Image (cartoon, rainbow, N blue to C red):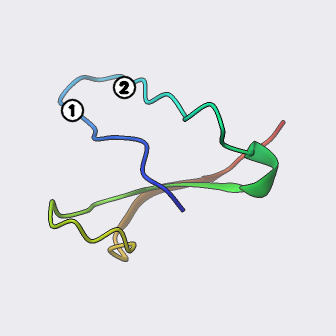
Amino acid sequence: MFSVGVLGDAADELLPLPPNVDLQAYSVVDVSAERFDNNTAHSGESLLRGTLTG
């Protein structure tokens, strides 16, 4: 799991993945509600979850 950015107020948001990410190592995208507290663990509050397909 890793963070790709912060969602803003726009209807659409582009959050590029780092170039060294191995997409075959990940099968799920999870958008979660996180606090700005420097804790990188998942909050347990998933707002959206989906399966990556190629």
* Quadrant of the snapshot with the C terminus: top right
Q: Position of residue 38 (x, y in %)?
A: 21, 65
- Mark-to-mark CA distance, 1 and 2: 7 Å
Circle 1: is it few (<14), some (14-19), or many (20+) Cα within 10 Å? Answer: few
* Residue type for callout 2: Glu
48 horizontally vs 25: left or right: left
Residue at 35% across, 68% down: 40
Which quadrant holds the N terminus? bottom right
Please say if 49 is above or below 5.
below
What's the residue type where badge 1 is placed?
Gly
Question: Residue 53 placed where, x, y %?
Answer: 79, 42
How far across and how far down the image is residue 34, in percent?
Answer: 25, 62
On the image, numbered disc 2 is attached to which residue?
A: 13
Left of 17 or right of it: where is 11? Answer: left
SS for dot 2: loop
- Give the answer, above or below, for where 21 lies relative to 41: above
At a point 28% along the width and 38% down the height, the residue shown is 7
Report x, y in % for residue 39: 27, 71
Q: Is residue 28 left or right of residue 33?
A: right
- Residue that badge 1 annotates: 8
Quadrant in the rendering for residue 41 = bottom left
Numbered circle sitting on residue 23: none
In primary-sequence order, the first of circles 1 and 2 is 1
Residue 46 vs 28, above or below: the answer is below
Q: Are marks 1 and 2 in contact (CB under 8 Å)?
A: yes
For disc 2, the neighbor class at 10 Å (few under 14, some 14 to 19, many from 20) is: few
User: Residue at 61% of width from left, 52% of height from top?
Assistant: 50
Q: Which secondary structure, mark 1?
A: loop
Q: Is residue 17 left or right of residue 45?
A: right
